[in-house]
Image (cartoon, grey):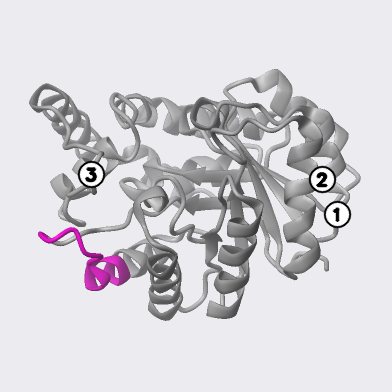
Amino acid sequence: MTSNIDFSGVFPAMCTPFDEDEQIDFETLQTDAQRLEEAGVDGLVPVGSTGESATLTHDEHVEVVEAVIDAVDDVPVIAGSGSNNTREALELSERSADAGADGLLLISPYYNKPEQQGFVDHYETIADAVDLPQIVYNVPSRTGQNIEPDAAVELASHENIAGYKAASGDLGQIGEVVERTRDEDFAVLSGDDALTLPVLSVGGTGTISVSANVEPERTCAMVGAALEGDYERARKLHHELGPLFRTLFIETNPIPVKEAMEIRGYGPARMRSPMTRLTDESRELLEDVLAELEDEPAAVADAEASP
């Protein structure tokens, strides 16, 4: 299939809120999805790494996807459905498709560290079986193995593989994937907030973003400005957001972003074990960064006022 999703713009990697018993707080989840849609994001990505997918059961995965779909009106929902087990990833992908997801985000197999042909076989197995646009997610800092450009380019030729979430931290490698897939219907999205603007500058189409949970309007303004070629405004927004980009990764994601969500009143900072709450020192730093952003809304206003 040719993707019917425009994979350009801002796609928040959503958090999964939990109640005091570590059960999913569906009411808060749906309220948050609506808040993000109203803020102008281009799509939503539940049950990825930021959504603590590693601590959810398969049934919970599907329930979260269904809840987000039910909550929003006009934005596509890209379900995280990856696993280090190809059969398990296929099952999650099929169930997400049946639940009504518009697309899929599949983290590369982690821990078992497959060779490059293993990555290709894994993704093609799922793309052959599930007729939805799919995004390959490369994040070697979490998975232990890098998807090399040759494998990414080979996957781009599959009609159901529509994009690549780039979180390797290697801008040269990301630029090579963009360069070598220019003739394909294939989107390269930043998976690292601090590199979103550089990725856009070499031809990336958008971002699957952690910071957009906290600052969706400003993130959308930055990406929108860059996609329109206004890099002066995009740089201004990038530098305003820079302290947040850094602070949201001061401890393991999604610990800081859930704490930021709580500070802003968007949801609880509760985590499922073995994840822990943010340390007091880090929380104080995060509070300072968020307060400073609230005091400096000018660049978003400037971006919204410009044609």
How packed mark 1 is, by other alpha carbons closer than 10 Å (few <14, some 14-19, many 20 or more), is: some
Mark 2–mark 1 contact, CB under 8 Å? yes
Q: Report, in whole angstroms, how far the alpha carbon at label 1 lies from the one at label 3.
A: 38 Å
Q: Nearer the viewer, residue 167 or 185?
A: 167
- Mark 2 belongs to which amino acid? Leu
Between 259 and 196, the one lying in front of the other is 259
Q: Which residue is mark 3?
A: 273
Magenta stretch holds residue 66 = no
Instruction: State the residue at coordinates (45%, 30%).
Output: 238
Which residue does the image show at 49% across and 57% down from the upper left? Answer: 45
- In the image, taking residue 269 as reference, residue 117 lies left or right, namely right
Q: Nearer the viewer, residue 275 or 39?
A: 275
Q: Which residue is mark 2?
A: 155
Q: Residue at x 12, y 61 (%)?
A: 21
Q: Which residues are magenta?
A: 20-31
- Point out residue 305 in the picture as x, y percentages from the top left corner: 45, 51
The answer to which quarter of the image holds residue 188 is: top right
Q: Which residue is mark 1?
A: 158
Look at the numbered disc 2 and give the secondary structure of its residue: helix
The earlier-in-sequence mark between 3 and 2 is 2
